[in-house]
Image: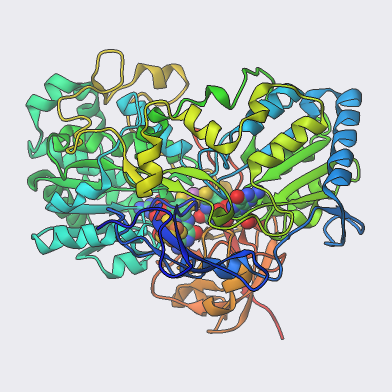
Amino acid sequence: MPIPNGSGPGGTRIVLGTCHHDCPDSCGWIVTVEEGPDGADRAVKLRGNPDHPYSKGELCPKVNRFLDRVYHPDRVLHPLIRTGAKGAGEFRQATWDEALSLVAERVRAVIDDHGGEAVLPWVDAGTQGMVQMTSLDQRFFARLGASRQTGSLCGATAGAGLAATYGGRKSADPMDVRFAKLVILWATNTRLTNRHLWPFIEEARANGAQVVVIDPIRTMTADSADWFIQPLPGTDVALMLAVMHVLIRDDLIDHDYVRRYATGFQELSERVAAWDPVRAGQVCGLAPGEIEAFARAYGTTRPTFIRTLIGAEHHEHGAMFFRTLGCLPVLTGAWRERGGGLSRSVGVWSEAAIDDAVFSVPSDTRQVSMNHLGRALNDEALGIYALFVWNGNPVVSVPNAAEIRRGLERDDLFTVVSEQFITDTALYADVVFPAATEIEQLDVIPSWGHLYLGWNEPAIAPRGESVPNTELWRRLARAMGMTDPEFDFDDEALIRSALPSVDVDLLRKQGFLRLDLPAELLPYEAGGFETADGKALLFSRALAEAGHDPLPEYRPAAEGPGGELHERYPLVLLTPKNHTRFLNSSYSKHHGEREGGPFFEIDPADAVSRGIAEGDVVRIWNDRGELALPARLSTRLRSGVVAVPWGWWGKDANVNALTNDTLTDWGGGVAYFDTLVEAAAVET
Ligand SMILES: Nc1nc2c(c(=O)[nH]1)N[C@H]1C(S)=C(S)[C@@H](COP(=O)(O)OP(=O)(O)OC[C@H]3O[C@@H](n4cnc5c(=O)[nH]c(N)nc54)[C@H](O)[C@@H]3O)O[C@H]1N2
Ligand SMILES: Nc1nc2c(c(=O)[nH]1)N[C@H]1C(S)=C(S)[C@@H](COP(=O)(O)OP(=O)(O)OC[C@H]3O[C@@H](n4cnc5c(=O)[nH]c(N)nc54)[C@H](O)[C@@H]3O)O[C@H]1N2
Ligand code: SF4
Ligand SMILES: [Mo]
């Protein structure tokens, strides 16, 4: 029998929740709560909910220890006011009233002197819960007339790329991968970043499917694949063009599907005619025979399931990657079958269930890219004088960290951070507000990796004086004299109002609820693309009008091989997620020792030519910054490509000191992975 929310044996209580992390898996969890010696509830166990249809009772190495985070001695439990220099991390404890008054007074002064747009909110997905990620803040900042955040660290470029071909962002149900006969994990490290999908892939494999991984790094997922294809970073579009070349040349096209549901086949055919596997192989660093074999496998197997997430969007031409990838299942008609098509994010389905009118009021103030935080803070003409950060740690997660630090050090900038810990960003705050953790706050988690909404019941009261983000906005709104009745809504009222078509009581009782969608989700089985005529755009006039190539095309990154900087900085630096115990920039401070410290991975040939030996401390640098890290000679990488795991904090470990802040072609993301560096052993 499913475990209902609230029951529990012998004086304990069982509380159903959902992992809030920015992770596609949105696992269901169960918290066991006991009355502690002081009479207050204490969470004593947090485990996976075995009834959850997707995560099936398993969590992951970091969240299995989530209670360590909740009860960690370093938790911020009271409001803090800065006493030392910015960045020094010297604070004194303050009362909520004092901290709120200070913020209200300083923000009013900024607005009086410089106008509302001198205030900038910066939020990421530290919790991706519906009300605790971003809700009442939208109303609060709109009332201030603040600048609006635009762009995205994650997802928007991929979504915009797919939308350029499909008109929308629908995806195949990830769980349907189990019906596939060919599974292509293209620029995604499933076993690390999407681990609960792996059993479904194994199910496909047990039924005879072949698993292909396409990645410039031989990741743990590549090690588990049947076929690993290792192109040079940022060259996949050339590979896709050659795949399409072979599909058309060998007539592996579903002509009926293309005729009915696509436009521009003729133009695309002419474009890809020039991209035979030999030419693409030169660009990608792959043997033409391997490209031929892959293209033929794609064109002759059914169903074929492409799985991709975010890795490929962190390039200058990231949107073009997804726009081009979207063409492949159209050409073969792979969308027709369960287990076919392409799956990236299914967030579009949960977004459709959310009516966010209660959260916001219209605002047409200027927009500032969250990826250019450093540039914005250092731009006198832009004039940002107050910054609010919550659910994020931009010093560690945004490119060009040195520039961000420089901006945060400004004496005339007033910075407010809501956090659970003193992160590298919170170090620069004038005021830190203590943030509740997920087991201390109510929310609904809309997943982007499966089709279930997750309920998150608070298991314990917020520790110390910490509060959920919604409560912070309510208190700040009152302190600043705002009177919208919505600021009096409690979290449950916000949730109920934002989910008009969802049976919230059933969701709460079960802990999860499948979105109201057909059991067999075939989004583009019969076309129905979200374009004007319902057809996929192999050729896109809209792209041409926006100044892009109307057809899929490969372009090298400006900061990449062949570019101007390459001579000085001959190594391409990749900085993807690499640790099972980290979630983005979270946990590295607390689980770092168990992950063995940050390191610099380099191919043995590249190491030898630079006099670098295993374990040597290596200086890695470019015009933006430098790091010194121990070398790991690694056969996971091709020559000319190096890697540093991302997520570590500190001036000497944060790899975003080096990364490229060029925005992506469209979609507002950023080109972390088009970064060039040079490296040398440090003389000791
Ligand atoms: N070099 C490089 N950089 C990257 C990436 C990469 O692959 N390489 N990946 C990018 C991607 S995809 C992403 S999504 C970003 C993520 O980057 P981050 O912003 O680092 O994301 P998280 O670690 O998920 O969360 C950030 C903070 O949110 C806080 N937080 C969690 N829950 C709450 C809450 O309820 N209230 C409040 N107030 N705070 C909370 C946590 O304590 C944490 O410090 O980084 C991007 N940066
Ligand atoms: N354990 C763990 N799990 C996580 C996270 C975490 O920090 N730790 N973060 C979560 C978040 S916010 C996100 S967005 C997802 C991201 O999930 P993924 O997209 O799966 O992860 P990434 O590490 O961003 O990138 C995946 C792969 O893309 C590859 N890649 C980079 N450039 C290219 C390219 O040009 N071509 C090809 N073919 N491959 C390329 C990288 O080498 C990497 O192996 O993971 C989530 N899950
Ligand atoms: S971080 Fe991801 S894998 Fe881990 S418990 Fe949360 S949703 Fe599941
Ligand atoms: Mo992300």
Q: Position of residue 372 (x, y in %)?
A: 66, 40
Answer left or right for 449 relative to 545: left
Q: Position of residue 378 (x, y in %)?
A: 79, 40
Looking at the picture, tell me which residue is in the foreground, 586 or 267: 586
Q: Quadrant of residue 72?
A: bottom right
Q: Position of residue 152 (x, y in %)?
A: 55, 39
At a point 70% along the width and 44% down the height, the residue shown is 389
Question: Do we see residue 242 in this rendering?
Answer: yes
Task: For the C terminus, give its image quadrant.
Answer: bottom right
Q: How is the image coloured?
A: rainbow
Above-or-below relation of 166 to 43: above
Answer left or right for 182 relative to 222: left
Looking at the picture, tell me which residue is in the foreground, 230 or 415: 415
Q: How many marks?
A: 0
At a point 19% along the width and 63% down the height, the residue shown is 202
Task: For the N terminus, give its image quadrant.
Answer: bottom left
At a point 15% along the width and 25% down the height, the residue shown is 526
Above-or-below relation of 667 to 315: above
Looking at the picture, tell me which residue is in the foreground, 41 or 434: 41
Above-or-below relation of 59 to 164: below
Answer left or right for 442 relative to 515: right
Question: Do we see residue 154 in this rendering?
Answer: no
Furthest toward the front, the residue is 10
Q: Quadrant of residue 84?
A: bottom right
Looking at the picture, tell me which residue is in the foreground, 342 or 58: 58
Q: Quadrant of residue 613?
A: bottom right
At a point 33% along the width and 42% down the height, the residue shown is 513
Above-or-below relation of 436 to 247: below
Furthest toward the top, the residue is 533
Q: Position of residue 57 (x, y in %)?
A: 33, 63
